[in-house]
């Protein structure tokens, strides 16, 4: 029986070697064919349909940048990978519904919040002036709306309370932060979004991947919270405060399980 198995293994190895050689012959031919095609084009640009760009972009992402440098493609690697990024961007591009002015740029919002938190006595006009010095022209009412939307009180009331910086300094050892990022994966069903939840200890900067799912629903998020707060080995077992945004993926079950 051992001789039979050994012979079978040798046959499999020989067959695999033959297939690899055949595949390499095909690849070498296609590379050379692409070189000839590029020579025939003489620098002219090919015109592709959106459907053709999508097909090439999917294959390009699977192939990877390193292999691109070894083959002669009719489209440059940078263009192919740019098409793939555009496909992902299109998935997250939504038409605005209804009238109204666009929301303030995120950069300005972040600056307003930072100035208000780090300078407890600054009012709307003072923050507006500081933004103007940085080249951002906004109205005082815009500053007011940003602060109100994020639950930050006007300067007189804000100054009476503990500053964010002071609070962080006092509780740095027991604070953590959490957020989601997404990964786009090509599947037989097309482009699928996976949501990755991570948590970071602020003092040590250590990061823990808490969960990866296509559907961050209540049951999933509740289990993640229970894992994070497990008395034995939960990543947040020694934390008292968890910083998170108002993303609806942080379900009520998730928040209740953290308490």
Image: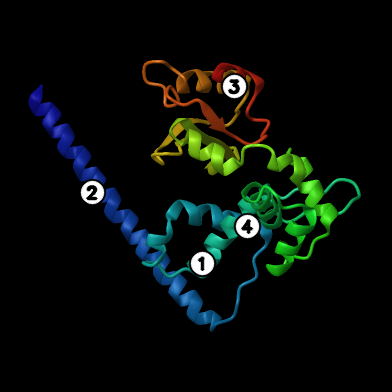
- What's the distance in space between the residues labelled 2 and 3, CA to CA? 53 Å
- What's the distance in space between the residues labelled 1 and 4, CA to CA? 12 Å
> Can you tell which of label 4 and label 3 is closer to the viewer?
3
Q: Which residue is mark 4?
A: 86
Q: Is 234 placed left or right of 141 in the picture?
A: left
Going 42% across and 24% down the picture, which residue do you hit?
238
Q: Which residue is mark 1?
A: 78
> Can you tell which of label 1 and label 2 is closer to the viewer?
1
**Mark 2 or 3, nearer chain start:** 2
Q: Which residue is mark 3?
A: 254
Q: Is residue 188 at least partly visible in the picture? A: no
**Mark 3 or 1, nearer chain start:** 1
Helix, strand, or loop for circle 1?
helix
Kindly indicate whether the residue at mark 4 contacts the one at mark 2 (C-beta within 8 angstroms): no
Q: In the rendered image of this protein, does residue 33 appear above or below residue 58?
A: below
**Mark 4 or 3, nearer chain start:** 4
Specify the label residue 17 is tagged with.
2
């Amino acid at each position: 029986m051992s001789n039979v198995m050994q012979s079978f293994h040798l046959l499999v190895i020989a067959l695999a070697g033959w297939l690899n050689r055949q595949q390499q012959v095909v690849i070498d031919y296609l590379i050379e064919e692409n070189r000839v095609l590029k020579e025939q084009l003489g620098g002219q640009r090919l015109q592709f349909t959106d459907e053709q760009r999508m097909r090439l972009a999917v294959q390009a992402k699977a192939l990877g940048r390193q292999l691109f440098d070894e083959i002669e493609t009719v489209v440059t690697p940078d263009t192919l990978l740019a098409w793939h990024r555009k496909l992902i961007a299109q998935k997250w591009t939504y038409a605005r519904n209804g009238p109204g002015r666009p929301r303030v740029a995120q950069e300005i919002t972040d600056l307003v919040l930072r100035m208000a938190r780090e300078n407890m006595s600054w009012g709307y006009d003072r923050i507006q002036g500081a933004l103007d010095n940085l080249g951002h022209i906004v109205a005082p009412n815009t500053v007011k709306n940003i602060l109100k939307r994020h639950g930050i009180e006007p300067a007189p009331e804000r100054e009476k309370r503990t500053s964010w910086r002071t609070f962080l300094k006092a509780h740095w050892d027991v604070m953590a932060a959490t957020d989601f990022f997404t990964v786009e994966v090509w599947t037989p069903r097309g482009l699928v979004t996976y949501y990755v939840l991570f948590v970071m200890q602020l003092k040590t900067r250590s990061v823990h991947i808490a969960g990866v799912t296509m559907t961050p629903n209540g049951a999933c998020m509740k289990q993640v919270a229970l894992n994070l707060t497990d008395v034995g080995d939960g990543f947040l077992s020694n934390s008292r405060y968890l910083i998170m945004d108002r993303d609806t993926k942080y379900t009520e079950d998730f928040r209740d399980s953290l308490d």
